[in-house]
Image (cartoon, coloured by chain):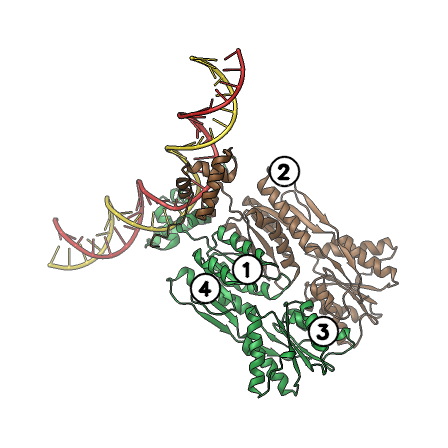
Chain colours: A green, B brown, C red, D yellow
Amino acid sequence: MSKEHRVGIADVAAAAAVSVTTVSHVLSGRRPVSERTKAKVLRVIEELGYRPDPSARGLRTGRSHAVALVVSDVTNPFYPLMAAGLQEVLQPEGFLISVCVAQGTIQDLDSVIDHLLNRRVDGVVLASLNAQDRHFNDITAAGTALVRLSGELDPRFGDIVRADDTGGMADVVAHLLERGYRRIGLVNGDSDSAPGRLRLAGYRRALREFGLDVDEDLIVTGPFTRTGGANGSHALLNLDPRPEVLVCGNDLMAVGAMDAIRERGLTVPDDVAVTGYDDIEAASLVTPRLTTVHNPALEIGRACARLLLDRLSGTPSEGVREVVLPQKLIVREST
Amino acid sequence: MSKEHRVGIADVAAAAAVSVTTVSHVLSGRRPVSERTKAKVLRVIEELGYRPDPSARGLRTGRSHAVALVVSDVTNPFYPLMAAGLQEVLQPEGFLISVCVAQGTIQDLDSVIDHLLNRRVDGVVLASLNAQDRHFNDITAAGTALVRLSGELDPRFGDIVRADDTGGMADVVAHLLERGYRRIGLVNGDSDSAPGRLRLAGYRRALREFGLDVDEDLIVTGPFTRTGGANGSHALLNLDPRPEVLVCGNDLMAVGAMDAIRERGLTVPDDVAVTGYDDIEAASLVTPRLTTVHNPALEIGRACARLLLDRLSGTPSEGVREVVLPQKLIVREST
DNA sequence: CGGCTTATGCAAAACGATGTGAGAGGACTC
DNA sequence: GAGTCCTCTCACATCGTTTTGCATAAGCCG
């Protein structure tokens, strides 16, 4: 055991009495190999426990077979699900999936992206809310495939996967209008984020389709967090008359809204109703359970993976694609 | 722009009018380089935007500079925090961190580990509950560094980081005993998992230290999930007299316990008190907020990273280490 | 049976970095 | 002024694959 020699393709070739080229070809299938030798080679590979070295392969092919998922918030349970979706389709293809958190400042995101480009990842799924054009540009300029979660389609900046935020939010508001609510407050996430903008659009659209005017005083924004939701809610609850329902930009904000409502001695949904967005696990843990919109995280992850795979393996097809996944309204007790 | 030639170390050397060796040395610092040339090289690197190719480096050095975190449950918010802790110390060192989910069956874990060994990761943090000796063995046999989350210390199987589960659970039970509770049911996670065993030990220890006998009928086990908790709770609530408090193996189980209690028209904590474990975000979202034990996920992640780093960079120090992090009891309204 | 196409296998040149053994020049000692 | 050490730099072999251009064997036709 003194010679800890790692078994390489040459060892396989020697043991199978063929050339390394042949071994490589049975592995890659780039040139035909007779059934007989193919079987022999595969058996030897099995016996020796040969595993091709990804570094050597990467050096030669110029592909690292690694992709990254960049997220902006560890505490948001949406992301792990998305990561699972990615893994489901990418791992069988031999890809290594790196999950990176770019919490907080833009500098964090800068350094994460810099790190990923240093590591020569083949592709990036950018699910970070605080991403900017500069970041998209850095990634595509490095020749790295890019898939964005939500955002505006731009031919320079890679494919996009998104849930139908506008439609989903419109469904929420339409549902409320049908139930008779009229004074509908919106506690939205920052509108310099794509989901923020799209959900706001959905809110407006539903009101418009009901022939109602939008009261700008009923719209506040803040970070997509529990405290962000609480702060925004307090602002709206100070109005007179106060809103009958608080439509929130995501579930975390909705939980914050419920904090704020309770803090004032009011009850949900009798005094003020609340809706969330995303259908994270916590949405069904709180009482009353939250009416929300199910964001198909797993499917989104899968879709991102497939787009990436297409980009990486297939022809360098021009043009960017957009995949829009439907959302589903989930009515629970909070409205 | 037709020649998309990627800038390599040779280009840098040429532009700086030195040899590639010199460039390599200013980067690695393995041999002294004069201040003047060092500065010149660094400037050229900056100008050209040179990034050393990790594949080439990995091929030469035999290190991939990639580590993996293997987890067994996407929905458990403990893991993302841990991942953030890993990233915090490993990313600045240039490591790529891959998060892998081995949900469900042992085969899943097998295939995840196989995948990681194929990818030649330098180290693995195994935080998967359903890991077995075989898996530890596969990893260490491949010469890959291993850090386990919890588990029994074994000189063959790498370092261990764990929270003081036994102590934490003992604190919970002691707290309950001090409050006067006597009939204390335990809804534990499967005891073929290390946390399950350790927490059970804490439960026994606290009772023993109070001079009380352990009533085995008051102990049930099941998976560390919400439904697992609900099922176990129903079993205990069927007892006559029923337990005054349900001590749960983790927060998710505690939420399940609360489901079960409410389903029977009982209230928490007046009829039956509940405690959780881990202090996940949901623990403070539910009403009443859960008395639980804070599991220092971030610190655990950091500790794992440091152990890994030690193993990888330093001397191949023999002997395995164990890092035990203290836990903190958090008393809220559910008791 | 000779010339042709197909099927199969081989040797050798990349890929881009690291690190060793050796050489060049400068400073210091005697 | 010659010898000795340092300090710094260099050329080149090496890591384990993929892949290209050829060589050979095997099948087919006239």
Compute the Cα span from label 3 to label 2: 59 Å
Q: Earlier in the sequence, mark 3 or mark 1?
A: 1
The label shown at residue A271 is none
Q: Chain of mark 4?
A: A
Provide the secondary structure element on which disc 4 rests. loop
- Both marks 4 and 1 on one chain: yes
Q: Nearer the viewer, mark 2 or mark 4?
A: 4
- Both marks 3 and 4 on one chain: yes
- Both marks 3 and 1 on one chain: yes
Q: Chain of mark 1?
A: A
The answer to whether residue A19 of the structure is visible from this angle is no
The label shown at residue B318 is 2
Q: Of the residues shown, which amino acid type is indicated by label 1?
A: Val
Question: What residue sits right under mark 1 in the picture?
Answer: A70
Where residue D25 appears, x then y in whole percent?
Answer: 24, 47
- Residue situated in front as seen by the camera: A27 or A127: A127
Residue appearing at x 77%, y 78% in the figure: A266
Q: Of the residues shown, which amino acid type is indicated by label 3?
A: His
Is the residue marked by circle 4 packed among few (<14), some (14-19), or many (20+) residues within 10 Å?
many
- Residue situated in front as seen by the camera: B83 or A258: A258
Provide the secondary structure element on which disc 3 rests. helix
Residue appearing at x 69%, y 82% in the figure: A244
Provide the secondary structure element on which disc 2 rests. loop
Where residue B198 appears, x then y in whole percent?
Answer: 74, 54
Question: What residue sits right under mark 4 in the picture?
Answer: A157
